[in-house]
Amino acid sequence: MQSDTNPTGRTSKRALGGGEYVEVSESSTCGAVPERLTLPQAIEGYTIGGAYAARRDKTEGSIEVGKLADLIIISQNPFKVAPNQIGRTQVMMTMVGGKVVYQASSWEAAKDAGSN
């Protein structure tokens, strides 16, 4: 297999999964195709997409009557913040099977302040 060379001539192997590798130039992006997901695509991939891949989309992956109540409440709406701020989002509460299994201390404080 022949590829474009870079000034250093160095390449590295990167795992693709399943025992497959791709050779990547260390200083050249010649021929590289940038891959990006939109925010909706990323969220879908972690929710209904993950459930579908595990063949559990009939019982998990979306909030619907009859499905397991596994969900999180987060500190900010990722659709309303700048993309570089999404990483600052914190999990405030986690429910598994309809039961609360985690609550951030700041969630309790906010909940208490709202009830006064």
Image: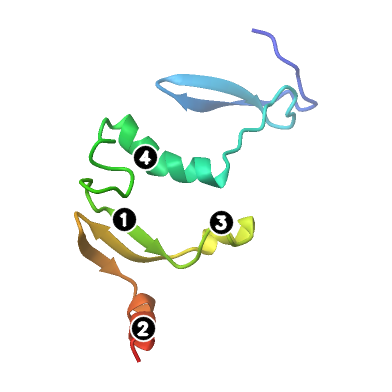
Label 1 sits on residue: 71
Depth check: give the residue in front, 63 or 37: 63
Crowdedness near tag 4: few (<14), some (14–19) or many (≥20) residues, C-alpha within 10 Å: some
User: Along the polypeptide, which appears first: circle 3 or circle 4?
Assistant: 4
Q: CA distance from mark 3 to mark 4?
A: 18 Å
Q: CA distance from mark 2 to mark 1?
A: 20 Å
Q: Inspect the image, locate mark 4, and give the three-letter code of the amino acid beneath it.
A: Ile
Q: CA distance from mark 4 to mark 1?
A: 12 Å
Crowdedness near tag 3: few (<14), some (14–19) or many (≥20) residues, C-alpha within 10 Å: few
Instruction: State the image coordinates of residue 47 (x, y, percent, origin top left).
Output: 37, 44
Label 4 sits on residue: 48
User: Along the polypeptide, which appears first: circle 3 or circle 1?
Assistant: 1
Q: Inspect the image, locate mark 1, and give the three-letter code of the amino acid beneath it.
A: Leu
Instruction: State the image coordinates of residue 114 (x, y, percent, origin top left).
Output: 38, 85
Instruction: State the image coordinates of residue 28 (x, y, percent, origin top left).
Output: 74, 29
Depth check: give the residue in front, 115 or 9: 115
Q: CA distance from mark 2 to mark 4?
A: 31 Å
User: Could you say whether the residue bearing mark 2 is in a helix, strand or loop?
Assistant: helix
Does 64 sit above or below residue 13? below
**For residue 109, which numbered disc appears in the image?**
2
Label 3 sits on residue: 79
User: Could you say whether the residue bearing mark 4 is in a helix, strand or loop?
Assistant: helix
Q: Inspect the image, locate mark 3, and give the three-letter code of the amino acid beneath it.
A: Phe
